Image (spheres, coloured by chain):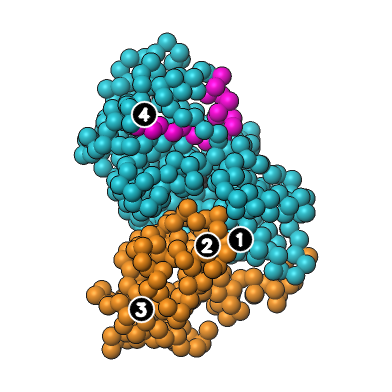
């Protein structure tokens, strides 16, 4: 019987000939990531293991991204704790303030490869599935154990196959597909499942767009959200195709679902769940105080490009703050080289250094009670950007257009003209 | 692990996220005495003041949805919460509970309409819960988890099994 991609990867990592859903395996970890948000808790736990050493200092990546540059005295202390730990254990891969968001760095610096088992002490580690890795989030204590052991137990999940057909209309983005799917499944609709994404709909997407989709998968509970490796993946990751990177043709799926992207509208997730997704038409006219373009699922180059296209030569509505946080140094530099940052700044946006930024309300881009923000970040639970604040999640296009209007608008009419610099 | 746990309950809804349990703005904080002051602030501002040591949380579906932050569990522990009973759990949160030796019991048949401050008794070994004069069964723990829970957490388990990690 054929196996899904998740089953093939976990069989390899578990040293088993084959595995089936429900089976519990001990998986060897190929890559482990932690960051400043829970690295300090992890270190406390690691230090409680007498004489523990890091199982393989080359396979651990430590990144400062959540409170970066240090947003408080306590954050500064946590950063120092991480730097010391990395030095003491001779961890080879340490990224300090200003490099970007962990999940983005992992793919852009070439750490994530198809067929890997990757764990991160962050729920959005599922982002690695964009490259066909079995990538999943774990907590800080578990990460301490992974660092000491290089393995962890995993229950082999059932796999749900999602096939996307058709082409996205102009002004509708990968991010809208993510919100649409969240709305279809709800906050625990794919809990504990591995998802495989297939179809002509995503073939033309670059890795950043695939990552925007996979990263958001965890908001409906997915344990892993994987795009089997194709030409785009192989070129990006610099590897040759391997049977271990793709599912068997006769793989058994728990569910096999098809969606057509051709008629999709821009989507907006209303407070207070990322899965409260509705077509933008249902929230038109909602007054906003702030717009945010950033996060591991919304601060990519395609996001900055479409924002610049909408904002070029115009001004952000008076009374609205627009905060743009490129998700990595690489995206920041490339956006700068393309002249995008200048356009964004001239339109009145505040462009901040690559990090998580306002995504978690970490002392930047906070909301006062009653204020409303439209954002490309990942979550909109109560208090996410400050107690009493409300967050609507949308695409970079919808955020940029709404920042001009001062209220939530459909971005499509803003994209009719094609500026000269768009190739 | 085999001991009965008894306490007053606080009833929460479905999809209680880790942002509800400990809003992300407190994430740079790792001191228990600070964390406890903000526990469940995302549900209600006055929650931290209502909770007493020994209380039990009762939740609906998808308890612990969202971020992997373990500070959420550290905050619950610091506030003296003894256990959680939920209809179902979000994956990472459930693992985090067990890894921290914190009793999290899944009870899909838990009735709606339970009231705050009712007394609940959990028999983790026997897989049973008593509340409001009724008894319910809960899901058994897989063996890997039982071993961890018995030792009071993953680190405690590894510390007495040093052959399991690199030294
Ligand atoms: S950008 Fe937001 S969701 Fe992504 S890692 Fe940072 S805080 Fe988490």
Q: Position of residue B128 (x, y in %)?
A: 39, 85
- Residue A334 inside the magenta-drawn segment: yes
Chain identifier matching the cyan colour in the rendered picture: A
Question: Closer to the camera, B110 or A129?
Answer: B110
Gap between marks 3 and 1, in whole Å? Answer: 28 Å
Secondary structure at badge 4 equals helix
| Residue A31 falls within the magenta-colored stretch | no
Q: Colour of chain B?
A: orange
Q: Is residue A416 visible?
A: yes
Whole-number angstrom distance, CA of label 4 to CA of label 1: 37 Å
**Magenta-highlighted residues:** A320-337
> How many residues crowd mark 2 within 10 Å: few (<14), some (14–19), many (20+)?
many
What residue is pinned by disc 3? B9
Q: Secondary structure at mark 2?
A: helix
Circles 4 and 2 in contact, beta carbons < 8 Å: no
Q: Nearer the viewer, residue A189 or B66?
A: B66
Say which residue label 1 marks.
Answer: A41
Q: Which mark is residue A400?
A: 4
Residue of label 2: B71
Place of residue B150 in the rendered image (x, y in percent of width and height, measured from the top left): 58, 80
Q: Chain of mark 2?
A: B
Please say if A279 is above or below A309. Answer: below
Residue at the image point whose x is 53% and y is 53% from the top: A122
Q: Are marks 4 and 1 on the same chain?
A: yes
Q: Disc 2 to disc 3, how far (Cα)? A: 21 Å
Which SS class for mark 1?
helix
**Label 1–label 2 contact, CB within 8 A:** yes
């Amino acid at each position: 019987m054929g196996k899904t991609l998740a089953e093939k990867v976990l069989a390899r990592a578990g040293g088993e000939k084959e595995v089936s859903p429900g089976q519990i395996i001990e998986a060897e970890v190929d890559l482990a990531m932690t960051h400043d948000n829970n690295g300090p808790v992890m270190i406390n736990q690691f230090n409680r293991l007498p004489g523990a050493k890091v199982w393989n200092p080359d396979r651990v990546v430590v990144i400062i991204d959540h409170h970066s540059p240090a947003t408080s005295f306590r954050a500064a202390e946590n950063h120092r704790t991480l730097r010391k730990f990395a030095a003491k254990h001779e961890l080879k891969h340490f990224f300090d303030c200003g490099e970007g968001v962990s999940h983005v760095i992992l793919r852009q610096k070439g750490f994530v490869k198809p067929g890997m088992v990757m764990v991160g002490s962050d729920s959005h580690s599922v982002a690695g599935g964009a490259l066909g890795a079995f990538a999943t989030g774990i907590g800080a204590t578990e990460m301490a154990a992974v660092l000491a052991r290089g393995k962890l137990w995993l229950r082999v999940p059932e796999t749900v196959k999602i096939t996307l057909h058709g082409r996205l209309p102009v002004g509708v983005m990968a991010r809208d597909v993510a919100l649409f799917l969240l709305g279809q499944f709800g906050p625990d609709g794919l809990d504990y499942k591995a998802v495989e994404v297939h179809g002509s709909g995503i073939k033309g997407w670059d890795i950043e767009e695939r990552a925007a989709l996979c990263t958001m998968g965890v908001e409906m509970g997915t344990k892993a959200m994987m795009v089997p490796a194709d030409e785009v993946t192989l070129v990006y990751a610099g590897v040759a195709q391997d049977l271990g990177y793709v599912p068997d043709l006769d793989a058994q799926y728990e569910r096999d679902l098809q969606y057509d992207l051709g008629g999709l509208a821009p989507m907006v997730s209303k407070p207070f769940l990322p899965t409260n997704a509705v077509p933008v038409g249902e929230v038109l006219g909602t007054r906003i105080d702030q717009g945010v373009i950033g996060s591991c699922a919304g601060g990519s180059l395609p996001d900055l490009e479409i924002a610049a296209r909408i904002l070029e030569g115009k001004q952000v509505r008076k009374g609205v703050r627009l905060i743009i946080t490129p998700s990595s140094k690489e995206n920041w530099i490339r956006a700068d080289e393309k002249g995008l940052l200048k356009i964004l700044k001239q339109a009145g946006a505040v462009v901040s250094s690559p990090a998580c930024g306002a995504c978690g309300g970490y002392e930047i881009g906070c909301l006062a009670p009653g204020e409303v923000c439209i954002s490309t970040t990942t979550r909109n639970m109560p208090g996410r950007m400050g107690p009493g604040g409300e967050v609507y999640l949308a695409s970079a296009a919808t955020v940029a257009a709404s920042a001009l209007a001062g209220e939530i608008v459909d971005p499509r009419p803003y994209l009719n003209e094609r500026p000269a610099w768009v190739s | 692990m085999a001991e009965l746990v008894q306490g007053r309950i606080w009833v929460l809804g479905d999809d209680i996220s880790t942002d509800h349990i400990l809003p992300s703005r407190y994430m740079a904080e790792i001191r228990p005495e600070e964390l406890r002051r903000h526990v469940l602030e995302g549900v209600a501002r006055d929650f931290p003041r209502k909770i007493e040591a020994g209380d039990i949380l009762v939740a609906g579906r998808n308890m612990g949805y969202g971020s992997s932050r373990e500070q959420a569990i550290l905050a619950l522990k610091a506030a003296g919460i003894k256990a959680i009973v939920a209809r179902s759990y979000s994956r990472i949160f459930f693992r985090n509970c067990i890894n921290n030796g914190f009793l999290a019991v899944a009870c899909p048949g838990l009735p709606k309409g339970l009231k705050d401050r009712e007394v609940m008794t959990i028999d983790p070994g026997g897989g049973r819960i008593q509340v409001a004069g009724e008894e319910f069964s809960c899901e058994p723990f897989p063996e890997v988890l039982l071993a961890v829970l018995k030792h009071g957490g993953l680190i405690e388990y590894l510390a007495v099994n040093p052959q399991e990690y690199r030294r």
